[in-house]
Image (cartoon, grey):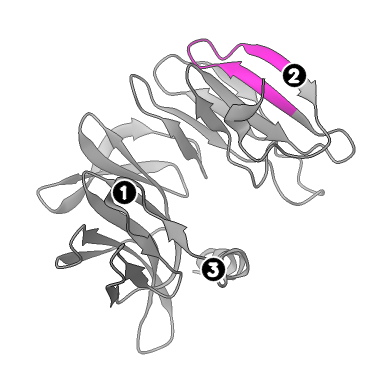
């Protein structure tokens, strides 16, 4: 529970006054649980401190917290239909990390790397194993994910991008800027303090195709050549 509380503090710092687009469905959301459509209609979910969300199969999936009568935060996933008329909630024991579509089914991984799939309105354990704190980069024919370097200088954990089925992995020293899929490549910004670079990685082999110094992170990583 202490880990959840610590993570929640970081989430609040990052998400205060933020609003996020939801892709094809064209819903936007705020961390306080308010969801809007393009016509200006909105609903208020029974979820607080929403920290991630993604549109999959024409519905918006969000992860956040619900506070019980004792004031304790519990991780929860919410699903909102495109017309805002249908919502569903699921309690989780651990913090959901990222939503993704694989084999035509909605999945979510938690902060430990365990993966769940939505089957008949229930989240069930999936036969997929990811590294802790992974963000999903692509699931077209293979699951490719990345986890970040530690934000703390005293901790030497370095980020990695890796393939689940092709068994490659490559060091990518990213922290806040999630690497981006650009065609058949991954583009990753490494801050590296005084020497920021962009790495270009082949999506099939994990081979580093290019490493180039930059003065600042590109606005769109896929615009990097």
How far apart marks 2 and 1 lie (CA) works out to: 32 Å
Q: Which disc is residue 160 wearing?
A: none
Report the side of 134 relative to 92 (left or right): right
Q: Which residue is drawn at 21% across and 43% down?
A: 57
Most foreground residue, 160 or 200: 200
Rendered image quadrant of residue 201? top right
Report the side of 195 relative to 37 (left or right): right
Q: Residue at x 14, y 65 (%)?
A: 86
The answer to whether the residue labelled 3 contacts the one labelled 1, judged by CB atoms less than 8 Å apart, is no
Q: Which disc is residue 211 wearing?
A: 2
The C terminus sits in image quarter: top right
Rendered image quadrant of residue 72? bottom left
Query: x, y percentage for residue 46?
Result: 30, 77
User: Mark 3 = which residue?
Assistant: 8
Viewer-nearest of labels 3 and 1?
1
- Secondary structure that dominates the magenta span: strand
User: Mark 1 = which residue?
Assistant: 55
How far apart marks 3 and 1 lie (CA) works out to: 23 Å
How packed is label 1: few (under 14 Cα within 10 Å), some, or many (20 or more)? many
Viewer-nearest of labels 2 and 3?
2
Query: x, y percentage for residue 102?
Result: 28, 32
The stretch of residues the image draws in magenta is 198-211
């Amino acid at each position: 529970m202490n880990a959840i509380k610590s993570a929640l503090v970081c989430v609040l710092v990052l998400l205060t006054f933020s609003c996020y687009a939801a892709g094809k469905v064209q819903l936007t959301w705020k961390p306080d649980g308010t969801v809007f459509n393009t016509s200006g209609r909105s609903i208020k979910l029974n979820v607080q401190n929403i920290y991630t969300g993604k549109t999959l199969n024409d519905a918006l999936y969000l992860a956040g917290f619900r506070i019980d009568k004792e004031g304790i935060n519990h991780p929860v996933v919410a699903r909102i239909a495109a017309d805002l008329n249908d919502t569903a909630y699921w309690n989780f024991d651990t913090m959901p990390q990222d939503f993704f579509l694989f084999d035509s089914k909605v999945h979510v991984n938690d902060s430990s790397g365990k993966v769940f799939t939505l089957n008949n309105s229930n989240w069930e354990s999936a036969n997929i194993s990811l590294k802790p704190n992974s963000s999903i980069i692509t699931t077209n024919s293979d699951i490719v994910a990345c986890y970040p370097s530690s934000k703390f200088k005293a901790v030497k954990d370095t980020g990695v991008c890796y393939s689940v089925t092709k068994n490659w992995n490559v060091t990518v020293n990213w922290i806040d800027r999630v690497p981006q899929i650009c065609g058949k490549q991954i583009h990753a910004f490494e801050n590296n303090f005084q020497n920021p670079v962009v790495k270009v990685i082949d999506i099939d082999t994990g081979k580093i195709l290019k490493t180039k110094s930059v003065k600042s992170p590109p606005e769109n990583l896929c615009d990097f050549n």
